[in-house]
Amino acid sequence: MPTAVRKKTQADDPPRPRIVGGTGTTVWGGSIDDLDPNTETRGDKWYGTPSKLGLGQQMLRDPHVRKSYDAVAGPLKSATWRFVPSSNDGLAREVADFCNFAFLECNAWSRALDWQLNYVADGFSLLEMTDNVVDIPRDRFPGTANAASGRGIVPTGFHQRPAWSITGFNQARGNPAQLASVRQLISGADNELPGERTISASRLIRTTWQQNGAQYTGFPVLRSAWSPFKAKKMLQLVELIRHEREHTGTPTFELPEGATEEMVAEVRKIAGDLRANARAFLVLPNGVKFTWSTTNGSTDIDKTVERLNRDIAYNVGATFLLHGSKNTSGSYALASTQSGHYNIGLDNHAAFLEDAWNIGQDGWSPVQRIVALNYGPGAPVPRLRALNMPTRDWSKILPVAHNLIMSGGLRVDAPLRAAFREVMFLPPEDPETLEAAPTQGAQPMTSPAQSADSEDAEE
């Protein structure tokens, strides 16, 4: 009797640890083949070299570009960065507190974040992390491997490795989309020997925005604003020339009919002296008329420059910042509508930065490393989060939360109270002096933005 053939299921497939396809990016000798159609902005022309500032950093010298950069970087730097435990377990909470201590308290976190955000202009940023054994609060972290000695391993610095100093990128063998190392050129300084250094990717926190294949330099946020920025600079130069020609008059002499050569020569001498000296009066030959000529032309350069400024702000979704400025108009409702996509973009940037620390882009995680070194490889790993982004409109959120609480749809507990205290910059709750909450006289809250929306609708 023939044996029945069992149908193969997905559970029968073995694991697939190796990749078959490739990144498609050409990388030879550490140099990336940049496919930017504009040769003016390709490769290190954008992020710079040790001897020349890149176009991305040059753009930041413009006030409108700087403001669009701050529209992305500012809210991220103003957020509350904190490690959130993986569970409510006691050990998980301690590990999260240890990471807050190791990363945020023992280091200049705001400076490290500021350096990391250079990817907005350059497309990528690199931080080299160092760590060492230091004294830690023994009572605060009793679950660490060396709690008895009061010693632990924490990051001792996040050191910037500027994009313009990187001269080569070496691909990882197992996954070409990841880096194995980078080459950095040190020009030399009082305390730095010149030469090229190779830095392993296992030491680097790399932040590459919109990496495509093995394009480790990424796609800079400001790259999309290059065209309006360049056109704006050209028009500003034309406008300055126009102002000079219109407001710096030209001395004009009208000679009478049949003027003699002697009269022409005398007028030429007067005109030359007028340009060379500051004269308060002129004595002209009989019949010669003098005027100070200026042009009467006008163009729309000013309006065009304002449009280009809006394009620069639109590049990051922040056109609402220009409402009410010259040649523009807007309302509260319009600004609120436009800021919706801008806030989504900021959430994407925040999640991107979180992943750079929690997961990493080159096969290792700074957070997992510090947790494993102090609590062992099986310890629960917390996640770094960007909380309380300043773009959140709490004037709308808090009334909704209040009404839900009053209707019984939301129950109040200690974590909820702590969260509200944090976003309103209030001190932590003190259980010993806690007063009973009022139960009578509470009325539903309305957002101040609701009345403003109705006024804007009429407008």
Image: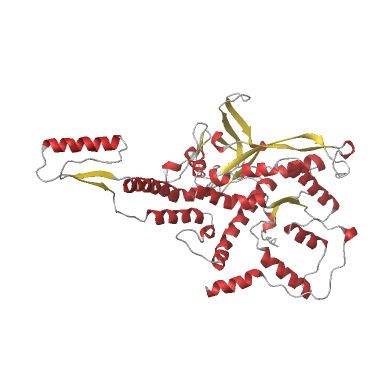
Q: How is the image coloured?
A: secondary structure
For this orientation, the residue located farthest to the left is: 258
* Residue 334 % position (x, y): 54, 66
* Residue 11 % position (x, y): 70, 56
Reply above or below: 268 against 420: above
In this picture, residue 377 sits left or right of residue 262: right
Q: Residue at x 36, y 48 (%)?
A: 243
Q: For this rendering, which residue is in front, 337 or 341?
A: 337
In this picture, residue 357 sits left or right of residue 278: right
Q: For this rendering, which residue is in front, 57 or 138?
A: 57
In this picture, residue 215 sits left or right of residue 157: left
State the quadrant of the N terminus.
bottom right
* Residue 374 % position (x, y): 81, 40
Q: How many numbered marks does the figure carry?
A: 0
* Residue 317 % position (x, y): 53, 57
Residue 4 showing in the rendered view:
yes
Q: Quadrant of residue 450?
A: bottom right
Q: For this rendering, which residue is in front, 324 or 162?
A: 324
Q: Residue at x 77, y 57 (%)?
A: 426
Residue 16 showing in the rendered view:
no
Q: Quadrant of residue 372?
A: top right
In this picture, residue 213 sits left or right of residue 204: left
